[in-house]
Amino acid sequence: MGRTLAQVTDSLSSEMRQKIDLGTKDLILEVEAIRLKQLRERWGISQQELAKLLNVSQPAVSKLEDRPDVMLSTLRQYVESLGGNLEILATFPDRPTVRLDISEIDAGAPAPICEDPGNHLSQQVA
């Protein structure tokens, strides 16, 4: 007689179950759309810690996470501060998904996240 999934997973080492759990979480993140705040929280980083990485205040991070529209350069800086790389996919109903090349957008010059109301990024964060 065949074994159930529970029986198979119960027979695995704790290390193997942990690898499977991490892989499952990665797959879920690949298909699930999440907000910046959720991403930061899943990585276990506080707004204060992220603010230090971005060299801004905690309220600036909070405002950024609440914005419905963020510049690509700001988004890239946020993602890179969490250790990731920003990629953008364009999906179409009747054509294949395409990865857009954003390497030229503000390449090497991350936009500053600051609280100066005259700064373009503050206008987005505010």
Image: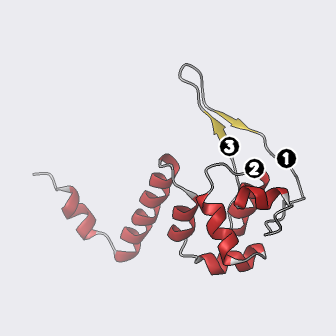
Element under label 1? loop
Q: Position of residue 84 (x, y in %)?
A: 68, 62
Q: Are marks 2 and 1 in contact (CB under 8 Å)?
A: yes
Report the residue at 58% width, 26% height from top.
92
- Mark closer to the chain start, 2 or 1: 2
User: In the picture, residue 85 is in which quadrant?
Assistant: bottom right
Mark nearest the camera among 2 and 3 is 2
User: Residue flagged by tag 3: what amino acid is it?
Assistant: Ile
Q: Is residue 33 left or right of residue 98?
A: left
Can see residue 22? yes
Check disc 2: other Cα within 10 Å, few if <14, some if 14-19, many if 20+. Answer: some
Q: Are marks 1 and 3 in contact (CB under 8 Å)?
A: no
- Mark closer to the chain start, 1 or 3: 3
Can see residue 82? no
Q: Position of residue 25 (x, y in %)?
A: 44, 60
State the separation of the CA atoms marked 2 and 1.
8 Å
* Residue 59 higher or lower than 122, as above or below: below
User: In the picture, residue 58 is in which quadrant?
Assistant: bottom right
- Mark closer to the chain start, 2 or 3: 2
Report the residue at 53% width, 23% height from top.
93
User: Which residue does the numbered mark 3 point to in the structure image?
Assistant: 88
* Residue 17 higher or lower than 4, as above or below: below
Report the residue at 59% width, 31% height from top.
91
User: Which residue does the numbered mark 2 point to in the structure image?
Assistant: 72
User: Residue flagged by tag 1: what amino acid is it?
Assistant: Ile
User: Residue flagged by tag 2: what amino acid is it?
Assistant: Leu
Q: Position of residue 120 (x, y in %)?
A: 83, 56
User: Which residue does the numbered mark 1 point to in the structure image?
Assistant: 105
State the separation of the CA atoms marked 2 and 3.
10 Å
